[in-house]
Amino acid sequence: MKNTVKKFFCGSLLFFFFVANSFGNGISLNSVGARAFGMGGAFIAYSIDGSAIYWNPAGLSFQKSSVYLYGTDIIPMASYKFTAMGIDAKTKTNHYLTPGVFANYNLGNISLGLGVYVPAGLGAEWDGSDLKVFSGGNSLEWESKIGVISISPTISVKATEQLSFGMAVNIYYAMFDLSKPAGPVQFTETSDGLGFGFTFGSLFKISDDISLGATFKTKAEVTMKGDATSTVFFPGPTKSEFERKVAWPMWVGGGVAVRPMDNLVLTLDAQWSQWSKSEDVLTAKYTDPIWNTAMTTSGGDKMTLHWKDCMQIRFGAEYWVSPDFAVRVGYYYDPAPAPDETVNILFPSSTNHVPTFGFTYKSDKFHIDVAGEYLIGGKRTITPTLHNMPGEHQLNTLAFSIGVGYQLD
């Protein structure tokens, strides 16, 4: 009996150490719409296609009716080195696809829109044989997948010929899967949930050549429900349902778009995310009483994140080489919200410098957009503390996007 209690207690502590801090860096994507993607996401004051539903819904008022479809392939490439433990690991080359579709209909002073898209998501998969030192010499799975789908009915109202306001209702469906060691045994978690939020936007055209835009997204809470599975509590139950409330942060952005010549547009955005209010400490409640008691007692029911608020600075340029062909470039600076003590290899976190590019070919009412970016992540050297994963962390990401639009009128 004493051995059983001892195993149970040690298992609880191992579970807490390896799982409680398994959430990672911010996951908001830049890839909503290929045109915005190519301009570094500096799109709040420009918003000239259906992706305005995400960037600034007020932009629909200055557009013709249209349908826009796009898809983005995100390829993260992370590495982790911990010389003291003999670890030199890299993620497997996985492709994370984020599609979307936008439709808008202009009724004059009122425009209606609907978007179905992926505003957030990422993942990582490691070879367990490179990380056996963390799992008692066992080669176990290390993988994370997180994604959000938003369904966003939208309305935009043109108050004057120069000023418009817009609002989108965001219905979020979130998914989160996790596989990693809990000491020498495997732990897996899968969950999903629904949440709601709003996007408010305004767009003011000072002249034909200068526009100002502002966007506000409310904090959106999602109650995630699912199953956790592990033998860490053996001889107790190997599975329990659980519930955890998570949130996407309040987001505020402002931008300016300037046309210094007929075929050139320059854009600048500042976009601020209030991570400190949404990603601080996340608490899970387990249905099984043994799981819930053990996790609550050990503190393993909590994901301690302590993220900080961050400001992204974005630049973009669009140049029409001819009436049918445009090229784009962009850049954005993306600081990591996660402090050293909560950095984790399943959700790599780094401060990023990101160049982007893109082009458009237009023919009559059709146009096709192509864009790409290379996210250059700075190395993070983490020194050992109580609740972190020490060593050298780095993340680079390659992404490509393609979009097709059709003007309805």
Image (tube, rainbow, N blue to C red):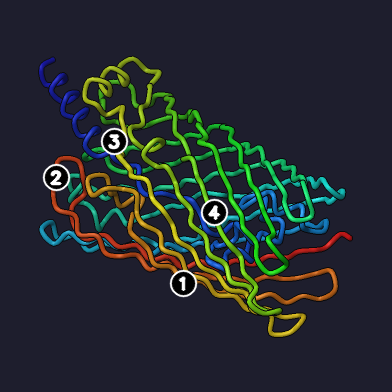
Identified by mark 3, the residue type is: Thr
* Residue 385: mark in rendering: 2
Identified by mark 4, the residue type is: Gly
Give me the C-alpha separation between circle 4 and circle 3.
31 Å
Residue depicted at 34% across the width and 35% down the height: 280
Residue depicted at 28% across the width and 17% down the height: 293
Disc 4 target residue: 254
Q: Image check: 64 left or right of 342? A: right
Identified by mark 2, the residue type is: Thr
* Residue 304: mark in rendering: 3
Q: For the residues carrying marks 4 and 3, which lies nearer the camera in this image?
A: 4
Q: For the residues carrying marks 1 and 3, which lies nearer the camera in this image?
A: 1
Of labels 4 and 2, earlier in sequence is: 4
Residue situated furthest bottom in the rendering: 321
Instruction: Give the quarter of the image for residue 17.
Output: top left
Please state the horizontal and vertical placement of residue 233, each as a whole percent of the image: 26, 25
Answer whether labels 2 and 3 touch (C-beta < 8 Å).
no
Dot 4 surroundings within 10 Å: few (below 14), some, or many (20 or more)? many
Answer whether labels 1 and 4 touch (C-beta < 8 Å).
no
- Pick whichever, 284 or 314, lies toward us: 314
Give me the C-alpha separation between circle 1 and circle 4.
20 Å
Give me the C-alpha separation between circle 2 and circle 3.
14 Å
Of labels 2 and 3, earlier in sequence is: 3
